[in-house]
Image: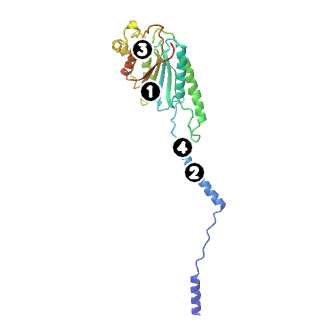
Amino acid sequence: MKSTFSSRRKTVARRPPRQRSAPGIGWSGIGGILLLLLAIVAGGAFAYFYFSTPTRPTLDAQTLCPLTGPQGITVVLVDTSDDLPETTRREVLGMLEDMIASLPPFFKLDIRVLDIAGVRSRSLFSKCNPGDGAGLSEWTDNPRIARMRWIDGFRKPAADAVKNSIASAKANSSPIMAAIQDIAIDQFTSAAAQNAKKTLFVISDMIEYTKDYSQYPRAGDLSFLRYKQSPAYLKFRTDLHDATVNILYVNRQPKGPPVIDGRAHMQFWQDWIVDNKGKFGSAKWLQGA
């Protein structure tokens, strides 16, 4: 009996352990895993677009400029002391319309005319380009609303200001220096403007004519020395804060010998800009006479 029991025990010990079958996943389990993977991929894609898209600054509701200040400032001063020749008028309109269309987002555009009675300048339009919605992600922004804001708040009123800027004021004086000084104080002096790219376009015949200083031949030569000896030098001394100044010359001289020596006149204004802490950008004669 003892040997029989031992042999049975050995036989039982030799039996391999019974395998337990793994529970089946089934189609519902596979579907759940796929949905989980899809959610992870979608979340990763959203996170990529969200964090890789540049953050749009918060804009002021009235000026459409970033609350921290514009990234750039472009000022256009139109001399309205006399009529623009028709050819010049058409060229100026085209240039200003191109300027509106190409202004970078979050740059301010300020369109001004001479305020001859006040001996300063007068702003017709001053707002930032809020962006036209191009390149915005549907995930993080609303391109359609941005486009409407650009058209209604910036594009249309800027175009209206351009048309109004070329209306003549018919005056016997031309305080160009005072107008530029006014622009520098209003647009280039604030702390928010210090890091912004600053540009000034002056559309004018550039013939300064006030009681303090005149550039007409009967008043004297065009040397900078004569200007420095006039009351206008200290009165209109200006800090342009490194703004780049571009001159678009309007030819209002009558037929016959030129009233103003063009080369000497251009040199005077280059000297004036540099003396007033600005940068001379360029000078161009507009078409028409």
Q: Earlier in the sequence, mark 2 or mark 3?
A: 2
Q: Earlier in the sequence, mark 1 or mark 3?
A: 1
**What residue does disc 4 label?**
50
In the rendered image, the residue lying farthest to the front is: 256
Q: Earlier in the sequence, mark 4 or mark 1?
A: 4
Label 2–label 3 contact, CB within 8 A: no
Q: Quadrant of residue 229?
A: top left
**What residue does disc 3 label?**
262
Which amino acid type is shown beneath numbered disc 2? Answer: Val
Label 1–label 2 contact, CB within 8 A: no
Instruction: Give the alpha-carbon distance from disc 4 to disc 3, as whole Å.
Output: 55 Å
Which amino acid type is shown beneath numbered disc 3? Answer: Gly
Q: Is residue 6 left or right of residue 77?
A: right
Helix, strand or loop at mark 1: strand
Tell me which residue sits at (56%, 89%) in the image.
6
Q: Quadrant of the N terminus?
A: bottom right
Q: Earlier in the sequence, mark 4 or mark 2?
A: 2
Instruction: Give the alpha-carbon distance from disc 1 to disc 2, as whole Å.
Output: 45 Å
Nearest-to-viewer mark from 2 and 3 = 3
Label 1–label 3 contact, CB within 8 A: no
Q: Quadrant of residue 231?
A: top left
Helix, strand or loop at mark 4: helix
Which numbered circle lies on residue 13?
none
- Residue 200 lies, with reference to residue 222, above or below; the image says below
Helix, strand or loop at mark 3: helix
Q: Earlier in the sequence, mark 4 or mark 3?
A: 4
In the rendered image, the residue lying farthest to the right is: 27
Instruction: Give the alpha-carbon distance from disc 2 to disc 3, as whole Å.
Output: 67 Å
**What residue does disc 1 label?**
198
- Residue 175 lies, with reference to residue 153, above or below; the image says above
**What residue does disc 2 label?**
41
